Every structure is written in structure tokens, then in C-alpha cells.
Amino acid sequence: SALHNEWNLKEVTVKAGAKVRFVIKNGDDEKHNIVGIGEGLNLLSPDIAGGKSGEFEWTAPATPITFNTLCSYHPTMILKIIVQ
């Protein structure tokens, strides 16, 4: 969930190669998204409009990695993803 331009989670741990379903509930007035920071991550959510919810699937990399994501509209909204 997003509220006051912050995610309610600071980090998420997933299994290498797993399909991950992100469910985003946007409690703000502005749109948000999730963008993985790093080469080859292919993590880019659709924009979730203010007051709306949405979901998308992503396949985690096959090898362990830890990286940050951010909202391209609000770069201080950081979510760490740990792939084990």
C-alpha cells in the first residue's frame, strides 16, 4: 500500500525464479509505480492512479540479488527486494 508517498513495506524477500504478484493499493491523490533499479531486472509496474488499486506479475531473477525499487514519480518511495 502507498500512503503519504511511502510504501507500507520497506523490503520484500522472494525466491529466485519465482513468479511474484504485486498488489498495489494507492491511498494517495497522485499516481505511483514500481521500477526496479538495475540492469536486466525487467521490473516495471503499470501506473496506479490515486485512490485506485492494481496488480501485476513479475518473474524474479534466477540468481540471488538484492536491489531497490522506486516510484518514478516519487523517487523517495524505496522498496528493497531480496531474491534468495
Image: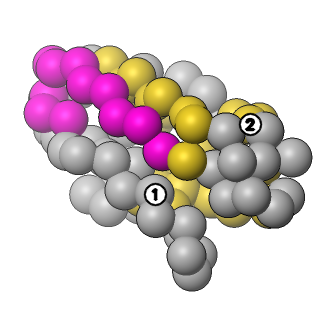
Spot occupied by residue 54 in the image (x, y as percentages of width and height): 25, 25
Q: Which mark is residue 68?
A: none
Q: Which amino acid does label 2 sit on?
A: Val
68, above or below 45, in the image: below
Q: In what quadrant of the picture does the N terminus appear? A: top left
Q: Quadrant of residue 56?
A: top left
Q: Which mark is residue 43?
A: 1
Q: Mark 2 points at which residue?
A: 14
On the picture, is 37 further left or further right than 75?
A: right
Q: Does the magenta stretch include residue 54?
A: yes
Spot occupied by residue 75 in the image (x, y as percentages of width and height): 41, 60
Spot occupied by residue 42 in the image (x, y as percentages of width and height): 46, 64
Which residue does the image show at 46% across and 57% down from the upper left? Answer: 43
Q: What stretch is highlighted in magenta?
A: 48-58
- For this rendering, which residue is in front, 33 or 84? 84
Whether residue 62 is visible to the viewer of this picture, yes or no, is: yes
Crowding around mark 1 (Cα neighbors within 10 Å: few <14, some 14 to 19, many 20+) is some
Spot occupied by residue 60 in the image (x, y as percentages of width and height): 63, 50
